[in-house]
Image (tube, coloured by chain):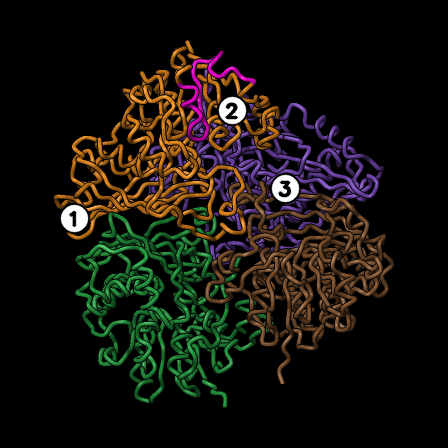
Chain colours: A orange, B purple, C brown, D green
Amino acid sequence: MATTVRAQLVGATGYGGLGILELLLGHPNFEVTALIARDDAGRRIDEVYPHLRGRCAMVVQAPDDAAIGTDCDVVIFATPDRVSQQYAADLTARGVRFIDYSGDFRFANTADYARYAERHPSISDTAHAAPGLLGSAVYGVSELNAGAIAEAPIVGNPGCFAVGIVLGLAPLYADGIVQDGMLIVDGLTGASGAGKKPAPVQHFSHLNDNVVPYRVLNHQHVVEAEFTLGRIGESTGATVDFIPHLLGTTRGILNTMHLTVTKATTRPALLERYRAFFAGHPFVRVLDEPPTLKGTLGSNYIDLSVFTAEGGRRVVVMSSIDNLMKGQSGSAMQNLNIMFGLPQTAGLDRGPLYP
Amino acid sequence: MATTVRAQLVGATGYGGLGILELLLGHPNFEVTALIARDDAGRRIDEVYPHLRGRCAMVVQAPDDAAIGTDCDVVIFATPDRVSQQYAADLTARGVRFIDYSGDFRFANTADYARYAERHPSISDTAHAAPGLLGSAVYGVSELNAGAIAEAPIVGNPGCFAVGIVLGLAPLYADGIVQDGMLIVDGLTGASGAGKKPAPVQHFSHLNDNVVPYRVLNHQHVVEAEFTLGRIGESTGATVDFIPHLLGTTRGILNTMHLTVTKATTRPALLERYRAFFAGHPFVRVLDEPPTLKGTLGSNYIDLSVFTAEGGRRVVVMSSIDNLMKGQSGSAMQNLNIMFGLPQTAGLDRGPLYP
Amino acid sequence: MATTVRAQLVGATGYGGLGILELLLGHPNFEVTALIARDDAGRRIDEVYPHLRGRCAMVVQAPDDAAIGTDCDVVIFATPDRVSQQYAADLTARGVRFIDYSGDFRFANTADYARYAERHPSISDTAHAAPGLLGSAVYGVSELNAGAIAEAPIVGNPGCFAVGIVLGLAPLYADGIVQDGMLIVDGLTGASGAGKKPAPVQHFSHLNDNVVPYRVLNHQHVVEAEFTLGRIGESTGATVDFIPHLLGTTRGILNTMHLTVTKATTRPALLERYRAFFAGHPFVRVLDEPPTLKGTLGSNYIDLSVFTAEGGRRVVVMSSIDNLMKGQSGSAMQNLNIMFGLPQTAGLDRGPLYP
Amino acid sequence: MATTVRAQLVGATGYGGLGILELLLGHPNFEVTALIARDDAGRRIDEVYPHLRGRCAMVVQAPDDAAIGTDCDVVIFATPDRVSQQYAADLTARGVRFIDYSGDFRFANTADYARYAERHPSISDTAHAAPGLLGSAVYGVSELNAGAIAEAPIVGNPGCFAVGIVLGLAPLYADGIVQDGMLIVDGLTGASGAGKKPAPVQHFSHLNDNVVPYRVLNHQHVVEAEFTLGRIGESTGATVDFIPHLLGTTRGILNTMHLTVTKATTRPALLERYRAFFAGHPFVRVLDEPPTLKGTLGSNYIDLSVFTAEGGRRVVVMSSIDNLMKGQSGSAMQNLNIMFGLPQTAGLDRGPLYP
């Protein structure tokens, strides 16, 4: 007999809300009970996004008019930072599970949350509104934490850059072979990661054919990557020098990551280790050639490859994801599947759009 | 009990072959029995297209090594012009149905075929190899010919520009209200319509940020559009002035079409007429606002809208499709569904990729 | 002995202001005496536009702090509609010539101005503030009005779409051979024509790879094209059905224009006529092949070609310009050269940027 | 009295030849005496490149028909590797100076040339045809070698990636403060660096919206960067881990470079050091913010910035150039100016094309 999970979506009109809405609409086991958002409240979602015509005609409700957490099995917060933490205590008390897209529940303690919040360009207050719940939230990198996600009352969906960094490096940190835990990452990202809000740097004439490095050595996702990599397997800590580069393309993140290993290795040995590490994980593909940005476009895959230099002491790892899928809504869908005992691939069996 | 249709794919390594392969892989009722192609024969398809890794590992067979039409219920020719007509007699004799992507079976008679072939830049011999079968082939615009397609031994899948023109104008030609049957079309197309073969005009540095008009007033798809529109409903013939413009984008065709009607009308009346004409057709969306190229990207939709000027005597119709979906493999999949008694939307319920 | 013209630039921080500033900086006979703008007043222009570093370090002055029309030979208004008309009486009284980028001085009478203003999306008051000066302003299509521009106290720089339409059709309207004066134009434009102000339709993720038709049959530049074409040579009036299409590219306008001629002609005859009509005009190139968008990028050229159909009764004209050059600042520079007795090409001898 | 340098251009029909031709056409002191190329010989250059219409109508001569080195003051080889070295002995013997775009004369000795040639994907024979002339050739990074270039019989124009790496790091290597000489570079490049020859990776539909890492840790320009940085100032050698990433854009190279310094420093100190190092060099701009790809588009500028981390021990340097200008023809023009005693900026005073 088919399960039906009833989901309420908060922050429904941003790109994050749109992404999970489309996945839920095509999922055999989910039903969307309410679309809630501050922007565009009162409008039909297919007026906000005309490409949804014929696919979904639900009307967006204002947060104040909607009973958040009522009449549903799960709440999905596709909202900015510091929204879900306001609702967390109430939802938890009522036994309603939720998943959150922001950094609100990615950290197990207030100190790490504060480190993250300090760096975040749009957070002013670094005190968490539900500190007592941080410990029961699970960080939603599905491949690393599936067991805990399955039971979690709260899942903190990971940041888009962090997904590519954490999964790309997990085997090496797990083995404790990254020298000084030190990592250099040049991240390339499409524009959609910044959402749909107009801004000068997102202006077409400015960004087209451009590359714009930003938040050099100061991006908030670094905290999350360091936090996660530093606690994995044999890892003794992680330090990440991270330079994000905004590209004139819509979707995708390609991270190129450089490190030194404590013991010389070879490319074949590393590829084998990666394939073993990710065996049984349907969305991780370890490639012989470098991953490309378009190789994962529109899908939930993460493509990885590994290279060596300097006699096997220097290692380069590259990862490619669709920032709105594996980097956001795809991971959320995968986590929701795990939370409700469904196959991880349910509703996500969509290949990359190529060419 | 579930139907399973066994399909053989010829021309598997071009963009057309790739498109239908991906649709078939995700279809609950189809099984691909062989991938056949001249290019890349002997290689795994996921080596030819690395984004297919983990999705399909079949090896491409050379045409000479493969038994075309054997061990299958249907053959799909995603091949250039003048390939399928060589196999047509044999397949038909053996009762094997097929669908063809080229112009080989789009015309009901040799005269119209010859008019088309003369204009085609890569056809030298305009004599058809299977003239006796033209009459039993059905032109595969699903919305117009579903009844005949259901029974057809041969389906001639339509040209990408023609789909957008024919469906965009069908209601007006059906009503016989286009003055002199005369139509002006400016067509805008992404690069992928020309396939994956490298060529100067397809070179990235040339095409990026460019618009390149080509085959001005001389494109072969015009013959097909004139042939079809001229035989529909009350139509008394059709003449199309068509200017294709190649854009620096990958996918999509947007046609802007201008005509004069014999009796003044209004925009609301036309929109109502269009909605009535296409009622019950799941892939046709008649919009209040102009369609956009990205509004159909990656999906099988055709988005239409209609505008009037000069007191309702002048009409502008716009249509948007993904040239590799509704303009090619999506239409083919829709036709295959019809041919085998499946719902038209089976395997095609994929929304546009936005943003 | 070298002339030096001292120019004051109002509206210096928009794309229009930037464009003329860069041309003036590279011009041997012009000196910029002041940069004036409401936005970014008080900042160095190379902080507003970092690519100007090392080229211009002038500080932008607020309009209220600057003495508009003082200490200069000419004022350039690269401002929105309805700005320069506020200053016109004062400047004219003081004998200061000016050129304006908006529609304020493109029309010889208030009735035509009102027709234009009514259609303009950001004009609410259609009464002109300096009606008495409309008659002494000259419409700045350099190739048509050089004589009058040379003496004009006021030049109304043309709209970007209008330049391509008017020059593309001038020979046919001049000869009075356009049937009913009726013209169909599909215009394709890069995003920069809408300026640098963030807006949803200009958002990178929305526009990239997209085509967005807008203001269908209702664009304000039509009024200007109809006004001009209708008064040229043997013309007996002009009616334009115009559909602008916004493309996912930064610069360029390609207009494809369709009409019927009253007497059958041939392509060679038309090409010859066009070449004769534009003989001696250094920025008009009449090509044998269709013009491309990138063929004029960054330059002041307008590329044209002409095609015929239906036995020479139907004509298609295509024009390509860089919307920020020949469509705006390049035309302004050309007009300023004419106004001050300099060669038309001075400061404009920059070829297209290809690839 | 004005100098006129008579230049012969070999390899005139590639992007490199096109670039220098356009600069020479706009230069007050150069005259092009012959266009020579294997491809398109016999055609007018404005047929090969229609955007040159009205700017240059010279006919391309086949190499066998042209007297290379005759009737000119300098020969410019915009040719692939191993062309100019065939002509070098003859030209030198006749006292004809030349500049070469390939790697033929970038190395002072045959051992380093061989290291480079071994890595080059299209060189099979690593023996140099004119080994005796390597010592008299000068490596053409204008900012480092202007004195020697002024007198050089042969100038080896630098590789596009190498320009951005070498100039970006020169101050640090000159000071001998790069730990172990070790450098990590992620290079992002537009497609035009690979020239105009159609190839699968250059196919529009493949590259648009894509990022394609290639020649991972194995690009031939590394040899040149290591060779140059290792011999500068206090440098004790250089090792470069270099990952080139091909972007879906036409022009530009942005290098992000990571290193550890032997003594902690600060960002302000580094910026000051860079500004002092490059004082008086008109094309080097040291910016407070990160350089962007479009900030140098179409110009000869190199934009640099520097950042620090880990208490000033880790340094990130970013450089942006137009790969066809400062990365190729712009540097060549700058070197030609130096060779003939002209101001470095002559013919190069063209600002970036923005937006």
Task: Name the side, left or right, on which B308 lies relative to B25.
Answer: right
Q: Which residue is at 33% across, 60% downward?
A: D271
Q: Which residue is at 45% across, 72% downward?
A: D20
From the top left corner, tell me how far across and down residue A326 is, in percent.
Answer: 38, 33
Residue range of the region highlighted in magenta in the rendering: A65-88
Residue A20, placed above or below residue B52: above
**Magenta includes A67?**
yes
Disc ID at residue A312 = 1
Residue A71, placed above or below residue A304: above
- Kindly indicate the quadrant of the structure image that contains residue A232: top left
In this figure, which residue is indicated by the disc labeled 2?
B346
**Magenta includes D1?**
no
Disc 1: CA contacts within 10 A as few (<14), some (14-19) or many (>=20)? some
Q: Number of callouts in the render?
A: 3
What chain does badge 2 belong to?
B
From the top left corner, tell me how far across and down residue B54 is, in percent.
Answer: 33, 33
Q: Amino acid at mark 1?
A: Gly
The disc, 3 or 2, on the residue closer to the chain's N-terminal end is 3
Viewer-proximal residue among D160 and B26: D160
Q: Amino acid at mark 3?
A: Ala
SS label for mark 3 = helix
Label 1 or label 2, whichever lies nearer to me, is 1
Q: Amino acid at mark 2?
A: Ala
| Residue furthest out toward the left | A263
Viewer-proximal residue among D343 and D32: D343
